[in-house]
Amino acid sequence: MLTDRFGRNIEYLRLSVTDRCDLRCAYCIPEGFKGFEEPAHWLNFDEIERLLGVFAKLGTKRIRLTGGEPLLRRNVTELARRIAALPGVDDVSLSTNATQLGKMAVDLKAAGVTRLNVSLDSLRAETIERINGKPVLNQVLAGLQAASAAGFAPIKINMVVMRDNADEVDAIVEFCLQRGYVLRLIELMPMGDTARKMGYVDLQPIKGRLQQRYGLIDKLLPGGGPARYLGSADGRFSVGFITPLSQHFCETCNRVRLTVDGQLHLCLGQEERMDFRALLRDGASDDDLIVAIHAAMDLKPERHEFREQPQKLVRFMSMTGG
C-alpha cells in the first residue's frame, strides 16, 4: 500500500485522458483559453497501461477517467478495457459532461467502467448555456437516459453550487429522487480567476436544510472519494457533500491525479508534482517507476490552502483533471 508522510493510504488515482472539452464551463476552462497540451505530449495507451499497472502493484485499486471531457479521447473505451483488466484494479469509473454519453454508454459498460459521475449544474436551459457555454441540456438528459438503459446504477449527478444556480438545489434534489440518481453537491473551488469570480456558496446551511426537510441520516456509499453522504431512511435517495472550503477533507485524502501529459499532481490545491512522462520516455524500468512513485508520495502536502490563500493557484481545473 502506498502511504504518504501523514499516514494516508493512497489507493485512488484520477487519470485525465485529455485536457480538451466540447463545453466551456467557466469554473473549469475559461472562455478564450488556448493553452492546451499538444497531443504529442499526451501519454499514449501503452504508457498509461504500464504506469497504472505499476501503481496497481503498489495498492492503487481505484481508477477514475477524467478530463477535460474523457469521452473525446479517441478509443477511450479500449483504454478503459485495458485498465479494467489490470491485476489489482477493482474499480474503473468515469466523470463526464454526458454530451457524448448517448452513443457511448453501452460500450463503456462493456469495457468495464463500473460507475459514472455526470456533471449537471442546472435544469434550466438558459443557465446551462450560461455556465457551460453551449445549449446542451437536452443532450445531457439524453445521455443520462442512455446510461440508465445500459445498466449503470447508481449514477451520480455532480452539481457545482454557485451564485447562478444555488436556487436550484431543491429542484435537482427532486430530479435525482424521482430517477434514482445519487446527488453530489460540490463547493466551487478557486481554481483560476474565472472560478473565483463565479460566486462561492457555503454548503453547510444547504446541508442542514436538506437534512431537516428530507429526514436524512448519515450514510456510506462506495466510491472512495471525498463526499460525505446523507440518505433517506427508506434508502430511496442519497446526497453527498464535497466541501473543500467549508469543511475540508484533507486528513482522509487517498487520491492523486495524473494529467494527460504525465504529470502526477499530489494535491488539487497545491503545486507539488512529478513528471512521469519524462521517466517513461527516457527508458525508466519498472523499479525506477516504483522509486519515483514513492518519492512522489513524500511530496504530497498535508492539505490545500483554498480558504487561506484563494489567489495562490493559477492553473485551471482542466489543466489538472476533474
Image (cartoon, rainbow, N blue to C red):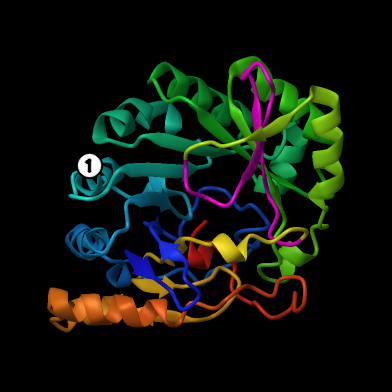
35 w.r.t. 62: above or below: below
210 w.r.t. 273: above or below: above
Q: Residue at x 46, y 78 (%)?
A: 5
Q: Residue at x 76, y 66 (%)?
A: 196
Q: Is residue 100 visible?
A: no
Q: Residue at x 40, y 50 (%)?
A: 64
Asked where in the image residue 136 lies, by quadrant, the reply is top right
**How crowded is the residue under tag 1: few (<14 C-alpha within 10 Å), some, or many (20+)?**
some
Asked where in the image residue 47 lies, by quadrant, the reply is bottom left
Q: Is residue 273 visible?
A: yes
Q: Residue at x 24, y 43 (%)?
A: 84
Q: On the rendered image, what quadrant is the N terminus found in?
A: bottom left
Residue highlighted by disc 1: 81
- SS category of the residue bearing label 1: helix
Q: In terms of depth relative to the viewer, which is nearer, 274 or 7?
A: 7
Q: In terms of depth relative to the viewer, which is nearer, 64 or 87?
A: 87
Give the extent of the magenta segment: 223-245
Q: In terms of depth relative to the viewer, which is nearer, 279 or 104?
A: 279
Query: Residue 73 in magenta?
Result: no
Asked where in the image residue 233 lies, by quadrant, the reply is top right
Is residue 192 found left or right of 206 in the rendered image?
left
Q: Position of residue 226 (x, y in %)?
A: 58, 52
Is residue 90 found left or right of 29 in the rendered image?
left
Query: Residue 239 in magenta?
Result: yes
* Amino acid on which disc 1 is placed: Arg
Q: Position of residue 212 (x, y in %)?
A: 85, 29
Q: In terms of depth relative to the viewer, which is nearer, 146 or 50?
A: 50
Type of secondary structure dominating the magenta stretch: loop
Q: Position of residue 171 (x, y in %)?
A: 78, 26
**Number of callouts:** 1
